Image: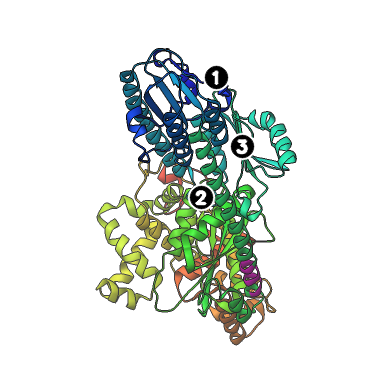
Amino acid sequence: MLTLGALVGESELELAFATGIPAAFYEDAQVCGVITLSLEHLLDGEPQKDLEPGSLVLITGMPFRIRGRIAAAIETLLEQIALDKCIGLIAAPASATHQSFPQTIHDLSQAYRVPLLVTTAPQQRWEGTHLRLQKSRLNAAEQQAARLDALIRMLPAQFTDHRAMQRVADWLSQALNAQVLISQPNRTLAASPATAAESLASAVIRKTLETNSPDRPAGPHTQMFSLAPSWGSDAVLAAARPAPAFSEGDVRLLRHAAKLLGLLEQARREYRAAAAASDAAKGAALELLLDGEVDKARRVIAAQAPGLLEADTARVYVVDTPPAARDAAARRCEAMVASRALVAVDPGDARRFLVIHPNHMGRGDDGVPAELKRLIAALGSGASLGGSGVYSITLLANALNEAITAQRFAVHQPDSIAMSARADLVTLLPPLEAQRWARSLLDPLIRSSSQWEQMRRLLPDALAYPYEIAARKQQLHRNTVSRRVSRAADKLAMDFNTVADRIAVGLAMELITRYAAPEDSAADGSSPTLCSLLSTPQVRAWADTLLSSVHGARRDLLTTATTWLMHNLHLEPTARALSLSVTTIRSHLQDLESRIDRDLALLSSQRDLQVALHSLTGEPAITDIAPIAATDSTAAPRGGRKGTCCRG
């Protein structure tokens, strides 16, 4: 809006301060409009109505000398102008002669702080000025509303947004064309431009020392406000610019900004305090859970998450991130899983945080595993996820060890995720290379296209189950199954009475069934060996996890398992080789089953045991393709490149 000094500077209005009036004291007053009164109306003696605050009162037809009734009426009007907070009285004389005011009116003007002005411009010009002032006022109101709206939109959606103050400072600097500083006595919270900290620091210190309260204007070109004086905040908002001076609207905007920033800072402090208390409670609950103190953990976390730990079983997930990103990732994870899981940072590892996911019976899938997968995808490279199986809530320490091991080989997975230490071996093998190996091993069957589809359907069941069961599943006669399996063994130059051959062919059939054939699936001599596929870090980590509970066993279960596999699952030859009784061998195998959580009557479990042992000890041997490429099938042993055993 226009100021009184600006109107005085307009030549067409012929406006000037009366003699003896200190112009500098009133020039910055903002003018909202002009109220015109005739001398006759003034002399009627009725109190003037509708004197709008911030307006100039213009009296037309004033005589050269002011005395008697006219002087008394002006004195009464000055009192009303002061009460209604108008900003000045203008006398427009009937002639073009500058008006002089009596000393009594000058004294009242000084007492009421209402300046006296005179003008010789015609009334029509002032009518146009009033319309211009009203338009300017409307524009100023719209601008102020737009600025306040923009200020509100600067506020963050989350209290943890540490860039919020800087964004507000940048916006204020641009909106006011000023240097802006938000600071505390010992540090700068935000500055815009960057040089504002150096430029305004001395002014902040000086003003604070002088007044002991920064919540007041420091001058027309420097403004300073406390962010939250009511609760003793020592942070201040300071703004400065060389010209023009800050208008009343600018000052109001800065005051509003200081109040909003103060509320934001207060909320952030309280949020940090609450978050710290929450994190401490979760950390304490986590330690109690890992120590098996479930009841104490439930009491600790009950206020924050009622009923969360009431389940009897739970899974543990380990999320590994770069140290600098861990805390933010943990907060993001907590927001995603809400009250469905307990999220706590690992005090022993700066890269990890843990997720305890109770398994409440009857609630079905609550989406936590899917949320964790989305989190890892969003975090990108450097983040990985390992998950345990379902454990009793009193055994979460064991679940944590399993999840940590799973996370170790998750870093070698394409998606950096291993949701359980019981990860499927097939998923750990590189798909393209595994397909090439499988097709190379089964090449004699695949080349016989007339029988391939038949074998593809039959062999998985025939290798995994007794022929009677396979025949029922395939709706064939037992003798038909036996004859076709024998034909397949002859073509592959294998003996399906040996467990190594059954495992190799069963694995190859599963790979071919699970994955589509690669474009270069023809046997071109470039196929990898199974030994090379099983030598990767993720397979070794998987094997170490599978057998981790066996290493501490009192009995030598690994030797028993290796010998049992080498003797094709026959108990008596195994017992003779180890100089033990069949009953002891059977007891060893039952103990082994419970420790690795596998049913060793199943071919898939026998495969997992064989691969894990071979990966860690080199025994027993596995059936593989020959590592030397052969392009001439007649140069290979019976069955082509198949039937070679590999020892680690």
First to last magenta residue range:
281-288
The numbered dot on residue 529 is 2
Residue 312: within the magenta? no
Q: Quadrant where the C terminus lies? A: bottom right
Q: Residue furthest right?
A: 209
Which residue occupies the foreground of this view, 224 or 464?
224
Please give left or right for residue 104 compared with residue 186 in the image. Answer: left
- Point out the tag, 2 or 3, that comes first from the N-terminus: 3
Position of 10 relative to 132 (above/below): above
In the image, is residue 359 above or below residue 410? below
How would you rate the neighbour count of disc 3 (Cα within 10 Å): few for under 14, some for 14-19, many for 20 or more?
some
**Residue 279, percent from left and from top:** 62, 63
Label 2 or label 3, whichever lies nearer to me, is 3
SS label for mark 3: loop
Instruction: Locate residue 183: give its quadrant.
Output: top right
Which residue is rendered at x = 60% and y = 61% of the image? 275
Position in image of residue 428 (x %, y %): 49, 56
Does residue 289 sit above or below 526 in this rendering? below
- Residue at 45% x, 20% y is 65
User: Which element carries disc 1, helix, strand or loop?
Assistant: loop
Residue on which the image places disc 1: 19
Residue 593: where, in percent of width, then height?
55, 77
Give the residue type that dot 1 points to.
Answer: Thr
Mark 2 Cα shell of 10 Å, populated few (<14), some (14-19), many (≥20): many
Mark 3 and mark 1 in contact (Cβ < 8 Å)? no
* Lower position in the chain sequence, tag 2 or tag 1: 1
* Screen quadrant of the N terminus: top left
Amino acid bearing label 2: Thr
Q: Nearer the viewer, residue 628 or 425?
A: 425
Q: Is residue 428 left or right of residue 226?
A: left
Q: Amino acid at mark 3?
A: Pro
x then y, percent, for residue 219: 62, 31
